[in-house]
Image: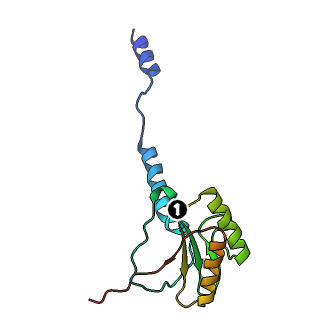
Amino acid sequence: MAEGVSLRRRRRSMSQINVVPFIDVMLVLLIIFMVTAPLLQQGVEVDLPQADAEALDTTPDQGEPIVVTVSRDGRITLNQGPRVGEGLERDELRGIVSDLLSRQPGTDVFVRGDRFVDYGRVVDAMISVQAAGAGRVGLITDPPEQDG
């Protein structure tokens, strides 16, 4: 009879789930994502001019606005499209913006120009964007620094 009792104990399966390894994996993933998230930000360093201007009204249902950036060295880049962050020529800029606007008409278009770049280069970017079909083009500036 003692043999039958011991056989039952051996055959009994364990029905508990050990969650400690799962928690360890989740914490490691959390740390990895926290470290890599800031590195995924793409952009061009631009020293924007300061201006006391009101913010433009944008509609959230239009999606992400198209931002054309003119860096200090005169390089023109886009925040959307097939060549994000790459230097573009005027005709390439016009073609990509035209394609983006044909897919999402009414998308807001903004130009970020470095304060030390040649003004003509910013105007060229604005003309290219308008030729691509943008009805309105906004300029992005930084608010003036407050003393005190």
Classify mark 1: residues with Cα within 10 Å, few (<14), some (14-19) or many (20+): some
Is 83 positioned to the left or the right of 29 in the image?
A: right
Q: Is residue 79 above or below residue 31?
A: below
Is 103 positioned to the left or the right of 141 in the image?
A: right
Where residue 76 sits, quadrant-wise, is bottom right
x and y, in percent, of residue 91 in the image: 73, 74
Q: Which residue in the rendered view is the most extreme toward the left? A: 148
| Residue marked by disc 1 | 64
- The amino acid sitting under disc 1 is Glu
Q: How has the structure been colored for display?
A: rainbow
Q: Which residue in the rendered view is the most extreme toward the top? A: 1
x and y, in percent, of residue 110 in the image: 54, 73
Q: Nearer the viewer, residue 27 or 61?
A: 61
x and y, in percent, of residue 30 in the image: 45, 56
Where residue 45 sits, quadrant-wise, is bottom right
Q: Is residue 80 above or below residue 25?
A: below
Q: Nearer the viewer, residue 124 or 117?
A: 124
Residue lying at 55% horizontally and 76% vertically, measured from the top left: 111
Q: Is residue 114 above or below residue 77?
A: below
Residue lying at 72% horizontally and 72% vertically, measured from the top left: 92
